Amino acid sequence: MTASIATNPTILVVGGGIAGMTAALEAAECGKQVILAEKSPTLGGRTSMLYRYFPKMCHPTCGLEINLKRIRGNPNVRVMTMTEVAAVSGTRGDYTVTLKIKPRYVNENCTACGDCGKAVTTEVPNTFNYGLDKVKAAYLPHAMAYPQRYVIDPSIVGTADGEAAKAACKYGAVDLAMQEQTVELKVGSIVWATGWRPYDANRIQPYGYDRYQNVITSVEFERLCDPRGPTGGKILRPSDGKEAKNIAFIQCAGSRDENHLRHCSRICCMATLKQTMYVREIDPTAKSTVYYIDIRVIDRLEDFYQDVQKDPNVSFVKSKVARIALNEANGNPILHGVNTEGYHRYANEHDLVVLAIGMEPEVAGVKLPDDIILDSSKFIEGSKSAGMFGAGSAASPLDVNRAVQSATAAALRAVQVIHKTASTEAA
Amino acid sequence: MSEANTQALARYKNNFLKEVEERVEDGQWVKMCMQCGVCAGSCPFGPHWEHSPQKIFMMIRAGKREEVLTSDSMWMCTSCYNCIVRCPRKLPITHIMHGLANYANRLGLVPKGQPTRDIAVLFWKNVVKNGRVNEMTFSLAMYFRDGLGQGIKNAMAMKDIGLGLMKAKRLNPMEIFGGHTCKDKSGLQRMIAKAREIEDKRRGLA
């Protein structure tokens, strides 16, 4: 006879990006009860902010659509957006979690008709586009947002703009009196799929991200290339809105550097190679130059690299750029360094510089319990009580494909905790 | 060829990396270099020396002993520390450069007339003698290192600065007759000799 030690058969998945959605779905499709908590107003995470994936160059909307369909069709998954985990106590099989739910100021009556957005005049930075443009303070986070429901920015609550949004709604969906809620739950296992964030480029002082407008990060470049992005898919440089014709990509911006991130972020080489393909597609006359220490195309994607190498518009310079200066006359960044193939000193002028920025674990709105074991780069290795797991890029710097694999593995471990029996526990 | 150099060649044969690791200050860091080139690009003296730091490190690993130890590169370092600050592997590049310079000097492989070396040697001899830097004898030794005629020219070119320093009581002309010393000068000299003995033993140079 064996008895389940999990006093509560529910699994909590923290984070609703591609890894969190996958972990929640895999466990739910095994018949487990799953709560998927996401701190932002929508599922999809940073994956939904990509223009395309490597290596197949397909759009994230496709994968998201499949996963959202699975979620909608599965009664075992309960999605909670605008929800953060405030505290975790207890042990494997029997955790008590405190969830904090921020007010959305829009209830389930919302049909996403957009009338509130039209009524509102205040604009806030658009986080979906990494702040490159603005959105109305009553907004739908993005076209694929799930739940497909508007959000009202807290800054207009209690102002005339807030009331205007409320008055514009024909369905009584705007509820400005909504308050923050705290909920306590019992769960058997927790999967932390809290994701990643781009390393703070301002800290890489010699590259002048904080000083030069035409030095941007790879995540910002991704939004520039997206037809639904702030520039409608044109690569317009920030200083003067001119089309960039001569773009530099700097690899290991923050990664593999004891002064910044110790680890190799793994995805940046492939991301840059992918972005050179965007450049070619958007403007066949534009040139890309990749400055690298060594190209690390993960897994079996060497052929992707070879294809890019054949492109006469793309050149490679084996060098970690030492510093960037500014040509004051035209706003062009000038890259200084030494090409280690032949030790040639260069001062190359480009009209746009893209920093292939490293991945670090997301910390904003993430409060990991003390029980969690972290590696030297603060990625999740596991937990002392062995009932909590890291998934996706919270566990390691991973691309979408590998994040999904990691999440499936984490879901299996969580299911095992729920299934674990007293006899195996004794052994 | 100096005896120390013959002995080192016999001991390390073709393994120059090992020689550097064991005998050069912070030499054990050389193998950590990942050849990114950021030190070379960051060096303010960049275009003016033969080999950049990351090139020197590669040459050490490739066993180019003669080229490394006789080059002027490590003598050009001004200790600005820009390379150390930016090195993604945190190699103490400045220290390794000085270590290489010191080792090359020890083996007698520095090209004749290397100005940084000559001045460093003059300074060292000067300070060890009395435990104090004697500015009079040190500057005169520097001026006259290229012969009597050149020495007079140098001294004449610098005379206004020299007179100014004397007026401001920053330079005492009487120091030319030996100058002042520190307390227990021979004690200091014994300490330095002992330190050298320990260091030589540690580096296998004894």
Image (cartoon, rainbow, N blue to C red):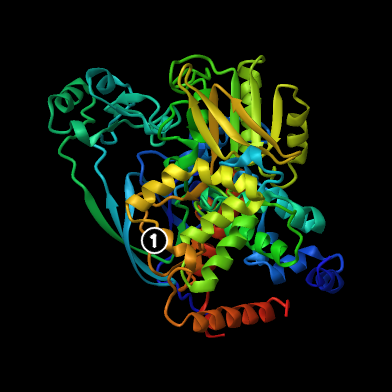
Instruction: Tell me if A220 is positioned left or right of B99 in this view.
Output: left
Label 1 resides on the chain identified as A
| Horizontal and vertical percent position of residue A189 | 45, 65
Depicted B196 relative to depicted B71: above or below: below
Taking the spot 70% from the left edge, 70% from the top edge, the residue there is B23
Q: Nearer the viewer, residue A102 or B120?
A: B120
Depicted B26 relative to depicted A319: above or below: below
Taking the spot 71% from the left edge, 22% from the top edge, the residue there is A313
Total marks drawn? 1
Q: Nearer the viewer, residue A404 or A333?
A: A333
Please name the amino acid that badge 1 sits on: Leu
Quadrant in the picture for residue A399: top right
Taking the spot 53% from the left edge, 59% from the top edge, the residue there is B138
| Horizontal and vertical percent position of residue B181 | 44, 74
| Horizontal and vertical percent position of residue B126 | 54, 66
| Horizontal and vertical percent position of residue B84 | 54, 53
The residue wearing badge 1 is: A368
Q: What is the crowding at mark 1: few (fewer than 14 residues within 10 Å), some, or many (at least 20)? A: some
Q: Nearer the viewer, residue B150 or B139?
A: B150
Q: Quadrant of the N terminus of chain A?
A: bottom right
Depicted B127 relative to depicted A61: above or below: below
Residue B88 visible in the current orientation: no
Residue A118 visible in the current orientation: yes
Q: Quadrant of the C terminus of chain A?
A: bottom right
- Secondary structure under tag 1 reads loop
